[in-house]
Image (cartoon, grey):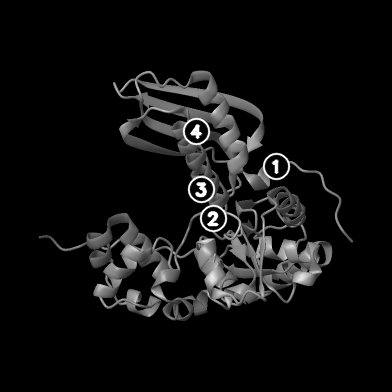
Amino acid sequence: MGEWLEIPLRYHTQRRIIHLDMDAFYASVEIREQPELKTKAVVVGPDPRQTGGHGVVTTANYVARKFGVHSAMPAAQALKLIPREQLVFVPPHFELYREVSAQIHQLFHQITDVVEPISLDEAFLDVTNNKRHEHNTIKLAQWLQQQILQQTHLTCSMGISYNKFLAKVASDHNKPMGRTIVRPELALAFLGELPIESFFGVGKKMQSSLHELGVYTGHDLQQLSQAELIQRYKKMGFMLYQHARGVDDSPVSNQRDRKSIGKETTFNPALTTDEAARRQLTQLSQQVAAALQKRQLHGKVLVLKLRDADFNTVTKRRSLDRYLYTATEISQEALLLWQQFGDLSRGIRLLGVTITDLFPVAYENLSLPLIF
């Protein structure tokens, strides 16, 4: 085997990037609307006592998080963790969250138009050249944080650095209402202290694999050679090698990225009743809605996929003049298509529901008055 030629790293430290993350956004909006909830453990999501134990936590405030509750946890588990006298379930109000998000995004654009929304409550801002002509990024972040607090009565946390990866990690470092800056000369030390799961792309499977190599922190990761990481993890290995050394050249992108999100399931034996098909379509719609909400996307086109027991496949689509986002909206449209085109004569072997023509929810052009 020939000698490994190491790919040189290029450090670009001239950019100034802010990653802004609203603090427990949905729960904080609900508490703003109902101040009496401030001392309660607020869980945004369905109350499992009213849904037969079904449903997952959308988010939770910091009081609830102290009991170990987190987003995507089964709502029934939250019920077990929090004393009944402190626990309050609040159903999500996504239209309200979108309105508040649009208001916050208006403030972003008072600083820069180079904004990359990640979700309703999270965004990257490239403030290298900003509209306020402010060279001190900490002052700029402080101004934005104060404006959000004054105009929405909500708090946020910020990470500031020369690239997106460091800014993202830094925003989680001091929550809530924190500001963390990672300067180039301190990046290696900062990264060295991070648990390995804080690095992009390191899920549970990757964690286990890295633990087998004795890697539990960024410092441990920094000890592995580029060759070893690439040979073991391919492209992901090179990204880990870069991130462990504070390198991330990905730009803050304000381009709309159209996508599609869908769920499908097969049946054996095939479905033969209208009731069973409708029940499955409702469940698929709920799964699609959860995936959309996780990524904070919504779309205007619904696609229904049908396959009969003879493996004949049909797709039907419905284009709308409004965005689909909730499980109720998606299932309503899917069931309308099923009513028009569903055919049980040969049985149903597969059902699929997909939403296409997607955009981040933050791109809704809402014109809202600012609150003073």
> Position of 283 compared to 149: left or right?
left
Q: Residue 116 location, x and y as percent?
A: 61, 52
Q: Amino acid at mark 1?
A: Glu
Q: Amino acid at mark 2?
A: Gly
Q: Amino acid at mark 4?
A: Arg
Give the camera-side residue of 1 and 96.
96
Labels 4 and 3 touching (C-beta < 8 A): no
Tell me the quarter of the picture where residue 34 sits: bottom right
Q: Please report whichever mark, 2 or 1, sits nearer to the chain's N-terminal start.
A: 2
Q: Which residue is denoted by mark 4 in the rendering?
A: 278
Quick one: SS at disc 4? helix
Q: Which label sits in the foreground, 3 or 1?
A: 3
Q: CA distance from mark 4 to mark 2?
A: 19 Å
Give the camera-side residue of 294 and 307.
307
Q: Please report whichever mark, 4 or 2, sits nearer to the chain's N-terminal start.
A: 2
Q: Which residue is denoted by mark 1 in the rendering?
A: 364
Residue 245 in view: no
Residue at x 67%, y 54% (from the top left corner): 92
Which label is found at residue 291?
Answer: 3
Q: Please report whichever mark, 4 or 3, sits nearer to the chain's N-terminal start.
A: 4
